[in-house]
Image (tube, rainbow, N blue to C red):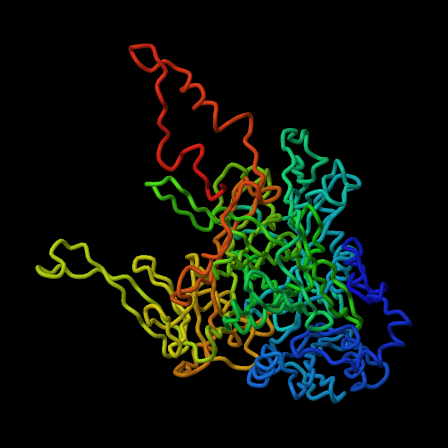
Amino acid sequence: MMANEDPCLSVGSAKRASVLEKGACVSSKFAASHNETSQTKSHPLGPIAAHEIIQSAALIRSCWPDGEECRFKMLTLLEPQKAELLPYLTAERAGQVPEYNIDRRVFVVYSIRGTHNVHEAVVNLTTGKVESNAKLGPFMHPNTDAEEVLAVEKAALEHPDVRAELEKLKLPSGAVVVSDPWIYGSDGVNEGKFFDDRRLMHCFLYMRDPNNPSEPDGCHYSFPLPVVPVVDPATLELIRIDILPTGLDEKVRPLSPWKPVPANEYIPEAQEEMRGDVKPLRVVQPEGTSFTVENYSELGRLIRWQKWEFKVGYNQREGMVLYDVHYDDKPLFYRLSLSDMCIPYGDPRHPFHRKAAFDLGDVGAGVMANNLKLGCDCLGSIYYIDGLLADTHGRPVVMPNVICVHEQDAGILWKHVNYRTSRAVVVRNRELVLQTILTVSNYEYILAWIFNTAGDITYEAKATGILSTQPVDLELTKTPHPFGTVVHPGVLGGYHQHFFSLRVDPMVAGPGNAIVYDEAVALPRDPILNPHGVGYTTHRTEIETSGGYDLDPGKSRTFKIINPSVRNSVNGAAVGYKLMVPPMQPILADADSFHFKRAEFADHSIYVTRYAEGELYAGGRYTNQSRGGEGVRSWANRKDSLAGGDPVVWIQFGINHIPRVEDFPVMPVETLRVMLRPVNFFDRNPAIDVPSSRQEINCSVAVDGSGTSLESAVRGMSLGGDGEERGLTTAAGASRDSPCVCP
C-alpha cells in the first residue's frame, strides 16, 4: 500500500471482481479530506487520483436531472497537448520549477444506465467545469465492464428459453453450465433479430466436469456446448439463441444429447502426479536493487536505473505507459505504450465469423491487469506499482500490484577472449523489467518493457492461458478440420491471429526526427569493382509521407528513427534507433471484411503518421462493434507530409495461432519481442563501463566436481612409451587458471 493511502481503497485480487462490480468504498475520512486533497498540485502526466475520479463523476452528474443515473465506462487522464507539455518537461529536467500550470483534464465515457445513450465528455478539474459533453453517433460503442459481464452471464443462464435449449442436451444431473460473454463483433447484417448496430454480447457456453461440478477452477473449456445466447448488455434482454455448427461445414443440426468425454484439467491438484525433482532456483540480490523509484505525482513513478530515467503512468485503456524516456540524460522517446490488440478468428461459419477481440478497446488493459504475486509472477527483489481506476458508479478502485519492477540476468551482454593470452573479459546482460499480466477471460498476456545497459529497449509479449474452444462432433475427433485443431475429444481450437500494435512517439536526441529504412543490396558484377560478384552495399530511403510499410527480409529492410540535425561524433552519421521487428503474417481476412476494416493496424508491420493530438489507439477510440475508418490506417491514408515534422511510429507484430494438442488444457507461452536499438547514437559501446562478471560477486557453484575431473584423470595417465607422466596442455581460452576477469 502506498504511503498515506486510505486503507478502505486497498483491494486484494480475490475481491477484485466483486469490487469492480460494486465499487470500492470511500471512507468518510477520505471524503472529508477531499477538498484539501483536490487542491494539491499534480504533475501533468500523473495518473488521475481518487479525489479527481470523485470530482469528475460529480461534475458529469451535475449535467443531468435528478433520477438519471450515469454508468461510467471510462474516466482517465486527458494528457496535455504535446506542444504545451514539452516545455514543462524540459524545465523540469533542468531542475527548474515550471512557472506555469497546465490544466488537469479527465476524459470521460459514460451512458445513462439501462439505455444505449452513450456520451463522451471532457472535464476540466482545474476550472471545475465540463468543457464538452456529446452523445456518440452510430456504430460508436463503449467498452464493456466487469459489472456488465457478470450481469450478462446471469441473464443468459437464468433465461427460460436458454434453459429450454440446454434441456435438449440432456446434460448429466447436477451439471454446472458456465458462460463466457464475448463482444459481439460486426458483420453488417441487419435482418430481424440479426443486427449489429446496437451493442450486443454473445455468450459461449461450457460445462464444468460433470464428475466434479463443484470445482470452480475446473477447465470448463473441455466441455463446450453448442448453445450461444445473444444478450443486450444495456437492457439484459435476450435477443436470440444461436446454435453452433459442430461438423466440418456450415450446417447446423438439431440439438442432441451430450456425449460423455473425459475432463482435461490444468490445476495442480487434478494431476495424477507432479514432478518431484524440480529443485529451488532463487534470485538473490544481497545488496538490494540497482534501481530507484520516486513519486513524480501521487500515483506516477519516476524510475532511474543504469543511466536510464523515465516516468511510469497507468490508465484504463493502455495499462502501463512510459513517458519522457532518457538514457544518460539524452532524450529518446516522448511516449511509449501498447496501443492496441486484435485477435480475429478464421472460422467463416455463423456466429464465429464475427469473433474478433480488441482487448484494449473492448475492455481495457488497465482493468484486466493481474494482482502480481511474489515468487510466482515476478522473481527476485520486486517493487510493485498499484493502479487506480473508476468503477461504473464513478468511485475509485485500487488495482494492487499491477506492475512489477525488477532486475534479471539475461545471459552474456558482451565477451571477448584474447586467444594469445587466454584472457576472457565477460559482461553479463543485466536487465530492468517492468511487467504486467492481463487476463482476458480465457487468455493471458504477459507484457513487459525491458531495458538493458547497452541502450536497448525491448517490448516482450507472451501469450498463454486457455484456448477459446468450440464443440465439434465427437466422431470427428480424429478427422482433420478445416477451421481448427481438435485438442481434446469433442473440442476444437479455432484458428486465429494475434496482432499487437506498439505506439512509439520518438524524440531521439531531441525533436525533428525522421523515419528511414535501409536495405542491403547486391552490387552488380563489375570487372573492376566487383569482379568476384561478392559485393553488396546499403541503400537508404526516407519516408516522406505517412503510410503503411512492410518488412522485407530478402533485403534486410530495417526501419530507423533518426535525427538528421544531430551527428555522431565518430562517423558523422545521423544518430538514431533501429526497430528490430519480428516478421508476421498480415491479417488473412479480405479487404472488404469487417475484420480487416476494423483491425486498421493488422495489415502492415510498420505504420508512420504525423503526430496529431488524440491519435493514440491504432484501432480507433471505440473498437466495440466498430466499422473501421477511425484508426491508424485511416490516419496514414491522409498522406501527411513528414518533412520537418513530428512522426509517430506504429509497430505491429503477432502470431498466427494454429493450435496444437500441446496448447491444451493450458498453453505454454508463445513469446514475441520487438527491440529498439541504438544505431550510431553513442560514440562507442555504451555498456563498456559495466563491471565485468566476477565469481566472488556471482558465487556460482560447480556441480558434483564438474570442470576438473577430466583434467585430473588425464594428468594422472601415462602418456609416453617411457611410462612417465607428461604435461597436459589446455586449449587456449580454456585454461583453468585463466580469469573471466575473475582474478
In the orientation shown, which residue stands out farthest toward the right?
28
Which percent across, then down, holds residue 114?
A: 77, 73
Provide residue 327's location: percent of width, then percent of height: 52, 67
Quadrant placement of the N terminus: bottom right
Q: Is residue 132 left or right of residue 355?
A: right
Q: Position of residue 234 (x, y in %)?
A: 74, 70
Residue 509 in sight: yes
Is 212 placed above or below 499 here? Answer: above
Which one is in front, 702 or 270?
Answer: 702
Q: Looking at the image, which is closer to me, 706 or 465?
A: 706
Which residue occupies the foreground of this view, 730 or 499? 730
Residue pictured at 60% horizontal, 73% vertical: 622
| Left or right: 618 as drawn, with respect to 99 | left
Looking at the picture, tell me which residue is in the foreground, 518 or 25: 518
Does residue 445 sit above or below 191 in this rendering?
Answer: above
Residue at 56 percent of width and 74 percent of height: 616
**In this image, 251 relative to 174: left or right?**
left
Q: Identify the image quadrant of residue 521.
A: bottom left
Q: Work out whether residue 469 can be spotted.
A: no
Give the answer, above or below, for where 6 lies relative to 467. Answer: below
- Furthest residue to the left? 527
Q: Where residue 384 sits in the image (x, y, percent)? A: 70, 58
The image quadrant of residue 273 is: top right
